[in-house]
Image (cartoon, rainbow, N blue to C red):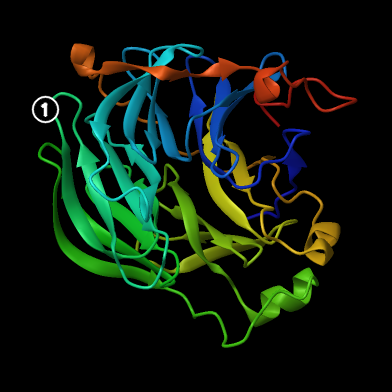
Amino acid sequence: MKSLNWTPLTELPDALGESPFWHPQEAALYWIDIPGRALRRADAATGAHQRWSLPSEPGCIGPVAGGGLLLALREGLFRARRLGAALERLVAAPYDPATTRFNDGRADAEGRLWVGTIYEPRDKPEAALYCFDPRGTPGLTRRAGGATTGNGLAFSPDERTLYWSDTPDHVIRAWDLEPLTGTLTRPREFHRFAPKPAGWSPSGDPARDTACYGGRPDGAAVDAEGHYWVAMFEGGRLLRLAPDGRVVADWPLPVRCPTMPCFGGEDLRTLYLTTARQGRSAAELAACPLSGHVLWTRVEVPGLPVNFCADPGPRAAPVPAHALSSGLADGSSEGPLPGRSAHPLRGE
């Protein structure tokens, strides 16, 4: 495949951007800044950007079929019926929020939300994968475990394979998925990457760092041909893996820490990529000034459209302590990057 040329989407960077999705009805990109405790949105027609503060760290977000968003926050799953509305609690977190929080996740074609966790002490594999069915019995069902940082949740085009990675273990796993019931069977390794070399730390030289360490699997997306695209955190690269687990494309990036790709635009051939800058050295940020920005490029193969979470109906209870407050840092919205309007999304 051809080389990729990346352009920043926003002027304001994130500390650690994650969970991007393209909303086809709004022609807009949504994503989160986890440590920044923020929800962000970019409008394709106007190029304007908005930011809403959140009460705690978000792990992932997704659109709801009945309108609004479903948000996985540290304390549980919440719904916002519209931007600016109060958060409504759907279900409490099934873990101790002092040590664990929700992380990467997305809905399947049946409208169930699959969401993993991160065990923050990182000294034992206490993270798990949960499934939430908004139409069924209230609560979360534990589907898998044995991880430290659950990441890379994605589905094959026929929804019969579920992918889930453990970032510190440098492994992506796969299961057979029964779409109607959500049952997982036949767990296996999809791809295992070389571990971080003992004593390795980034030098600030991108070429040298990538030659020494290829990174570990973070967020992912699947394209229409069933290939798995994964951001390699600290590896400064984006990989495309075939359905049999082979790496078939490897693109260098202008950042050291990509976090998650997402397909968008009318033709789903605009690839967005969230990135991180939190905790990175001054030398690295000087060498990679786009760190923390959402980047975009055009690709040859379209991706899969976002799945909407099923409408949970009236089960949610309002949480009056916090609402999604509009504006940058509770102020004004952010406009397009200086010198240009909305980014191109409809053709080359």
Residue at x 75%, y 39% (from the top left corner) = 8
Name the residue nearer the viewer: 225 or 251: 251
Residue at x 28%, y 42% (from the top left corner) = 114
Q: Where residue 310 appears, x then y in whole percent?
A: 25, 23
Task: Identify the residue under disc 1.
Answer: 136
Whether residue 232 is situated above or below residue 327 in the rendered picture: below
- Image check: 91 left or right of 256? left
Near mark 1 (Cα within 10 A), the count class, few <14, some 14-19 or many ≥20, is few
Q: Judge whether residue 114 can be spotted in this image.
A: yes
Whether residue 299 is situated above or below residue 284 in the rendered picture: above
Residue at x 11%, y 27% (from the top left corner) = 136
Q: Dividing the picture into quarters, in which one does residue 333 lie?
A: top right
Quadrant holding the C terminus: top right
Q: Where residue 220 appears, x then y in whole percent?
A: 46, 51
Secondary structure under tag 1 reads loop
Q: Could you tell me how many numbered marks the image carries?
A: 1
Name the residue nearer the viewer: 149 or 269: 149
Quadrant holding the N terminus: bottom right
Q: Judge whether residue 178 can be spotted in this image.
A: no
Q: Mark 1 is on which residue type?
A: Gly
Name the residue nearer the viewer: 2 or 199: 199
Q: Dividing the picture into quarters, in which one does residue 306 lie?
A: top left
Q: Where residue 147 appears, x then y in whole percent?
A: 31, 65
Residue at x 78%, y 23% (from the top left corner) = 336
Q: Residue furthest bottom?
A: 198
Q: Where residue 271 appears, x then y in whole percent?
A: 60, 40
